[in-house]
């Protein structure tokens, strides 16, 4: 009877922390790619969605490492946050996290970096043509983490930020990268996802496309974390009720 | 006797607000130049020095418009702050301030912008060479405000951020731009001016080069504002005592 009593005491706790024992890495924010010591290329990601996902996974019991590009929002409590600038640093920090069960790549990683960043500030010269910045591809963090093998996380989730043909591009991206799910969100200026508090996303998996309603970024994060728990056969109360 | 009494009451106030009646524009922070709706080129300026100068001029009684690029610090109290992104917007906001006596161009304005910003997000294509970003010069805000004419502010102060040959480049910049003073500061990574709380500057004017000690950015701002008051023949107590 004592064992039964303990089980019934623990059962609600387990349902509330369905990701206990799982290790997750979440990337968030933009990356900054140096042109010279002063200038850089970056993007408008605020980190709000990625940080919220890190918090949501931690709230469900996962042990979370958040790898964050430069953002102006606070490190979430209950999460180990690693701060990086460039895509190269972000990939290294993800790999340094070791064996993980869940990877959520929510960062807006720069696709390209300067091929040859200048060691000193590039001078503007009167009468001279402006320099043209030659670019080279950054490492593909999502594709790297999705690569088949014994180290591959059981679940790899990517994000697709698009201004056009959102769902078609995201379905294509899922196949190309080899990840399990894609969270596709519209970042056209009219929608204004970057920096805003709400997000309209589509969840793309092998089973198809789910259109989610416009939600606060914290709600998108909680719903995604719930789906991740369900994927590991550990539904939250909310997911079990659906 | 009443007039004398009033004068003696007002005199200290005048010495503490030596820039009363003067109108100033201060630019601060970086600019952001769009590559496409998602990506931009920017730089590491924090806006701390420019914002501190706006506050210091206001503290000495000037009516100050602060034209700020995207920064994560608060608008200073007692100052009208106009928020802009690009160099084009920053110039327009400076000109919109109308007739001014003092211009302090402390912003780290991007020298270049994308020649043809893309209307939708530039796609990364597998197997394709990365794009090369063609640049075109931005408007030169300091040179524009320094242009001789009836609208020219009585005092135009520029900043020079350099990683090499700081003073020589700054002397050259003063002549080229046609401004009155240059505040030259070393932004080499070893010194780490960007984002830090202290600044080591040189004040370059027609009379030569003054080397200032390393000071908190607020102290650099107060000293510069004091020199500006002195330039208008209205020494602060600190300047009068020197």
Image: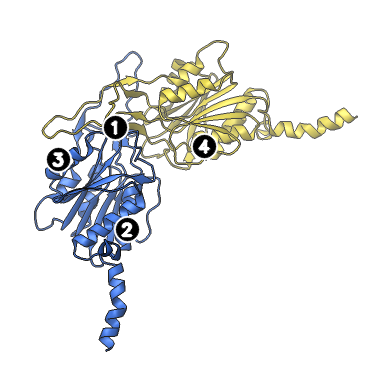
Chain colours: A yellow, B blue
Q: Nearer the viewer, mark 4 or mark 3?
A: 3
Instruction: Tell me whether circle 1 and circle 3 mark residues in contact (CB < 8 Å).
Output: no
Residue furthest bottom in the image: B1
Q: Nearer the viewer, residue B113 or B158?
A: B158
Count the marks.
4
Q: CA distance from mark 2 to mark 3?
A: 27 Å
Secondary element at tag 4:
loop
Subunit of label 2: B
Between discs 1 and 2, the one toward the N terminus: 1
Q: CA distance from mark 1 to mark 4?
A: 30 Å
Residues at marks 2 and 3, common chain?
Answer: yes
Q: Nearer the viewer, residue B159 or A4?
A: B159
- Residue at mark 2: B56
- Residue at mark 3: B172
The answer, for residue B193, to whether it is visible in the render is yes
- Residue at mark 4: A213
Q: Nearer the viewer, mark 1 or mark 2?
A: 2
Which residue is found at the position 31% from the left and 47% from the top? Answer: B213
The label shown at residue B35 is 1
């Amino acid at each position: 009877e004592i064992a039964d009593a303990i089980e019934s005491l623990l059962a609600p706790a387990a349902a509330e922390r369905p990701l206990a024992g799982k290790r997750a890495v979440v990337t968030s924010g933009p990356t900054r790619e140096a042109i010279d010591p002063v200038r850089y290329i970056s993007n408008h990601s605020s980190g709000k969605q990625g940080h919220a996902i890190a918090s949501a996974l931690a709230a469900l019991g996962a042990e979370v490492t958040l790898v964050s590009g430069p953002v102006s929002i606070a490190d979430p409590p209950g999460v180990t946050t690693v701060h990086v600038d460039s895509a190269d640093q972000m990939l290294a920090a993800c790999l340094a996290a070791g064996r993980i069960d869940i990877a959520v790549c929510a960062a807006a990683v720069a696709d390209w970096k300067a091929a040859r960043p200048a060691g000193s500030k590039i001078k503007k010269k009167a009468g001279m043509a402006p320099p043209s910045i030659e670019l080279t591809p950054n490492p593909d963090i999502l594709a790297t983490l999705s690569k088949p093998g014994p180290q591959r996380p059981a679940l790899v989730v990517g994000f697709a930020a698009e201004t056009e043909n959102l769902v078609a591009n995201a379905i294509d991206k899922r196949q190309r990268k080899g990840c399990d799910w894609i969270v596709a969100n519209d970042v056209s200026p009219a929608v204004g996802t970057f920096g805003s508090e709400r997000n309209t996303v589509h969840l793309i998996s092998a089973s198809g496309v789910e259109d989610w309603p416009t939600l606060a970024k914290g709600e998108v994060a909680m719903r995604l974390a719930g789906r991740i728990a369900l994927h590991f056969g550990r539904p939250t109360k909310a997911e079990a009720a659906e």
